[in-house]
Image: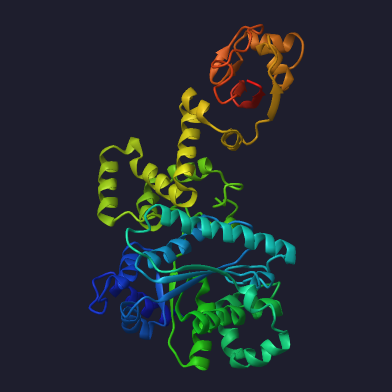
Amino acid sequence: MAAPIIHALRSLRRFSRPHSRCLSGLCDPLVSGTRRGLFKDVFPAETARVQLPELLSSGPQTVYCGFDPTADSLHVGNLLAVLGLLHFHRAGHHVIAVVGGATAQIGDPSGRQQERAALSPERVAENVRGIRESLQRIFSQHEALGGGGQPGGRVTVLDNAAWYRHRSAVEFLASVGRHFRMGTMLSRQSVQSRLAAPEGMSLAEFTYQVFQAYDFYYLHQKHGCKIQLGGTDQLGNLMSGHEFIQRTAGEDVFGILLPLITSSSGDKLGKSAGNAVWLNRDRTSPFEFYQYFVRQRDSDVERFLKLFTFLPLPEIRHIMEQHAKEPEKRIPQKRLAAEVTKLVHGKEGLESAKRCTQALYHSSIEALAAMSDQELQELFQEAPFAELLLEPGTRVLDACLKVSAIPEGPRGFDILSSGGVSFNHVRVTNPDEVLVVGQHILSNGLSLIKVGKKNFYIVKWLHV
């Protein structure tokens, strides 16, 4: 296995330079993606160096990538694959995102030490809906942001359950399974590593590569797809697809492999690492998403600007030059966070993230007053949220007691009197002070009560 990958890397390095066979802008994604570190390997190495640039330059091609619905949202670890598709789309190629509504019930063994927990059909259907929403929203946001400034190719989101739903296991094995050889399947790294593990490998997992290969074949037959994107851990599955299509259709198809992204500390950006940053707002708010990228280390930020944004490389170099002069301003981190948040959550999501940042880290009353109920609850996730009727003469003490922010009796009175409570970042010391709209109650009808340093309470006042 090592030799083909070494040859592939050598071939891929050639794409980082202007290539004589890249005769049009249609070939740009291969060149620019390699320069940015977005594409790591190509397959098959022996033909990709010559044929892949020629194929891309010959006219718009169809490129696909698969996404397993093992959760109801994609995460940052999946974003690189989406960006890979978008780079081809911006150059005028057609892209297909396939959600594995069928294959999720089998489970991809690639890169795993144990078999995935079985998902019920109902859970898979729910996850498919969530991931379709993630993909369609990002594709729409990309178009709304200009989509590269020129007409792109078609964007399609499919569920592979559509082409397995009416096939029986016996018919599928008889027509498709006969083209696969056990020796070749057993040689795959994903299979070898699992067979050596104490738990072994189930028959269902072993057949996963057959289904992914058939996905590629189906898209090749129905949509003329000749290029698949996938992570480096998908090489075995991609090879199976290539061999199956060559054997049955007699045509060459290609794979472009994306790197596994980790931080400089070695942390994986995927959900299995326990540090998932999700792309759906109900799992990770725009504020949390934005802050995740703002907090990136200096040692990672230039690489992430190249991978996760469409900023031209000269502009990224200029940003890093500014950073070298004024590192305390964290210019590249803020630009990275803004670009990625805008792509995933749109301009409104970016503005929401900035409002929350101003309200939390800069104690901005103006930002707090502009925030919605949803933003406040996202910002202070652990904070109790209450709706209260504002009655004439309601005091600071009354409000705090109604949301159980302070204990009843002298202890609560003392906490207030000693300045332990603030309304909308302004400390109050008079328990009998009557609530005033515009001071204790913001123009959006909300109050943010803080007791001590970390205890927040959100109140939505009715009939303000």
The reply to whether residue 269 is visible in this rendering is no
Colouring chosen for the image of the structure: rainbow
Q: Quadrant of the C terminus?
A: top right
Which is more toward the observer, 331 or 156? 156
197 over 298 or under it: above or below:
below
Q: Which residue is painted at 59% across and 85% down in the image? A: 185
247 over 236 or under it: above or below:
below
The reply to whether residue 293 is visible in this rendering is yes
Residue furthest front as drawn: 463
25 over 131 or under it: above or below:
below
Q: Position of residue 67 (x, y in %)?
A: 56, 66
Would you identify the image quadrant in which residue 396 lies?
Answer: top right
Q: Position of residue 85 (x, y in %)?
A: 44, 66
Q: Which residue is painted at 62% across and 12% down in the image? A: 435
Which is more toward the observer, 105 or 385? 385
Seen in the image, is 118 located left or right of residue 129?
right
Would you identify the image quadrant in which residue 19 lies?
Answer: bottom left
